[in-house]
Image (tube, rainbow, N blue to C red):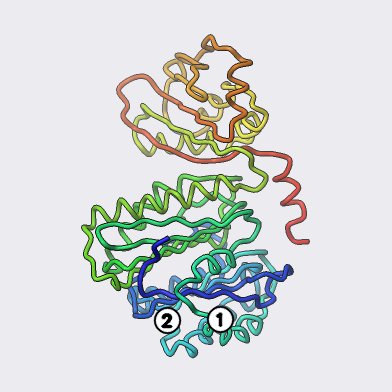
Amino acid sequence: MNLPRGYRYSSVYAGVRKAAKDDVALIVSDVPAAGAAVFTRNRVVAAPVTVARENLRRSRGRVRALLINAGNANCATRTGERVARECIAAVARELGTAADEILPASTGVIGVELDSRLIVDCVPRLVKGLDEKRFEDAAAAILTTDTRLKTAFAEVQGARIAGMTKGSGMIHPRMATTLGFIVTDAPFTPAALRAMLHRGVERSYNRISVDGDTSTNDMVAVVANGASGARPSPKEFEAALGGVLESLAAQIVRDGEGARKLITIEVEGASSDAAAEKIARAIANSPLVKTAVAGSDPNWGRILSSAGTAGAPFDPRRVDIDLQGCAVCREGVAADFDESELKEKLGAAECRIRFTIRGRGRGRARFWTCDLTEDYIRINASYRT
């Protein structure tokens, strides 16, 4: 794990969440850095999202630190923005920087007032604990119902990239509960980072779904401080950044609440890439498809039916469907296959669905989701308690 140069990380338990484990994380660049972020498209927006957007605009993309808390979304409350601003002001005082250069983020329960003193009072400990080796401590502190750490790394032409993310439920990003933070020691302007991040997110975070719900707090940010002295080509760097984003996004789906299987959906032959994405998303969000995969049931009719609800044009009589590499549908009707053999293949930890439209269409898309099990209901039936 070769971490980018010029960053330090910290985490503490502030008492925001009920379980006594670290719930506040801080990521600091030793020098002012360029930053960019994408945010939720939900009309209900958490206070940290509003403040982070404003800070990026006011600082013109200049970022010094990221402050993240878990256990409370700081959303739909009377004091949300005041709390977010008080917390970043406390960090700014300790770091000797402007509050506008700090991006806040929160994740957890919606509609519960957050006591800013919990975080403000722990800031001195948080800053004192900053260390270049505490990347994984920070990555663990931002988790909620996640069952595992989610990190990804890359190195390109002398520059390093490191990313952490969280997310297990309420996952249907459309920027982009998910949070993602990527740091690099490459030198790029905020405008360049913003363009690369938007393209990368479109092919990663915006192509995943666990349950079809878009969080109020979604945020993916990238920070570049240039501390490596390297100057990777924009094309090579964007490819590496895209790989990190794709890895992080896939890890979220693999760890979906109650999930046992990762499902990869590939659509080809649509009238456009946008049409292919609509079809893939409709398949991914179908509870009937997800439960069929959970039960290892090769019910391809559910796939064809869900695709038909996508609002994208296609002729059902020209559709081929493959499950785990096995032909189950050809030209819109059943293909001959060994059901018991395919059922066994569907018992694997990963499932691949290929949806092909015959003809001249060149649109294609890839999407990730997971199966839907009884454990998802159990987890979310008692989330607040």
Residue 169: horizontal and vertical position, in percent? Answer: 62, 51
Q: Which residue extends farthest top?
A: 336
* Picture coordinates of residue 281, whole percent (x, y): 50, 39
Q: Which of marks 1 and 2 is nearer the N terminus?
A: 2
- What residue did someone put label 2 on? 100
Q: Distance between the residues labelled 1 and 2?
A: 19 Å
- Please rate how many residues cluster around mark 2, counting C-alpha atoms within 10 Å: few if below 14, some from 14 to 19, many from 20: many
Q: Quadrant of the C terminus?
A: bottom right
Res 215 quadrant in image: bottom right
Quarter of the image for the N terminus: give it. bottom left
- Reading the image, the residue beneath label 1 is 126
Query: Residue drawn at (55%, 58%), measured in percent from left and top?
Result: 166
**Label 1 residue SS:** helix
The answer, for residue 340, to whether it is visible in the render is: yes
Q: Which amino acid does label 1 sit on?
A: Leu
Question: SS of the residue at dot 2?
Answer: helix
